[in-house]
Amino acid sequence: MRVVILISGRGSNMEALLRAGLPVEFAAVISNKAEAEGLKIARELGVETVVVNHKDYPDRAAYDAKLAEAIDGHGADLICLAGFMRILSEGFVNRYAGRMINIHPSLLPAFTGLDTHARALAAGVKLHGCTVHYVTPELDAGPIVVQAAVPVLGGDTPDSLGARVLEQEHRIYPLAVRWIAEGRIALTGDGRTSLQGSPASTAVLISPQG
Ligand code: GAR
């Protein structure tokens, strides 16, 4: 399976994917920003990098066409959005239906969009987390592959909570790609996915623990 990763910045999820020893070939890392720190890490890890700068294109359609050209030129079977901070056009998303996944820093469907950690704190939730999901035209709303929850602790700031969530992002994104590469994830057609061969678990996470 040939995988292309799209980033805009730091690239820590990209790095987690590249270092996870997954049974896939990473064909390229593509960024919409030349200064994205993740590009340097990808090059150090021997992965080809490409910049498709949105500022070079007059509109979203022109940009998305160029992005698709770069993705298809690398023969991508799976596209992983990893902190790729661009809204993608419906045509672009539909072109890669069932082949493009994203990681989002909340337990979807709660807290779609930006500033998820600050909003979780403001809402007073006791559990927060992250989600890997297939990308559909509706923002942060596609079929969920895997989620991880963390407790919200007294005294948490958006940064401390975000760091706790990020640790879990680095666990579940490689897990999702592994399962997909192994052919274990089925899109069930009703907006959900199912995992073949999942172990039964009765683990419960309660926060606060008292
Ligand atoms: C990650 O926390 C990811 O979940 C989030 O951006 C961060 C990128 O960090 N993505 C979104 O908010 C997408 N809506 P990284 O560049 O270090 O992986």
Image (tube, helix red, strand yellow):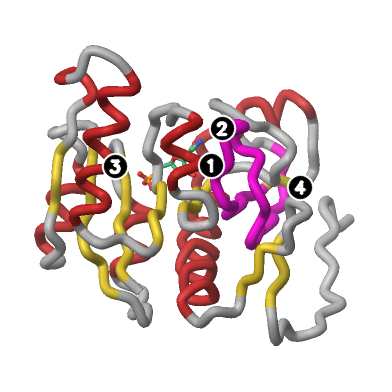
* Amino acid residing under circle 3: Ala
Magenta-colored stretch includes residue 209: no
Placement of the N terminus among the 4 image quadrants: bottom left
Identify the residue position indicated by label 3 in the image: 68
Q: Position of residue 123 (x, y in %)?
A: 78, 27
Magenta-colored stretch includes residue 142: yes
Identify the residue position indicated by label 4 in the image: 127
Q: Quadrant of residue 31?
A: top left
The range drawn in magenta is 129-154
Per the model, the C-alpha gap separating discs 3 and 2 is 34 Å
Crowd band around label 1 with a 10 angstrom C-alpha radius: few (<14), some (14–19), many (20+): many
**Which quarter holds ligand 1?**
top left
Q: Identify the secondary structure beneath mark 3.
A: helix
As drawn, is 176 to the left or to the right of 79?
Answer: right
Q: Quadrant of residue 10?
A: top left
Are the two marked residues, 1 and 2, in contact with CB atoms closer than 8 angstroms?
A: yes
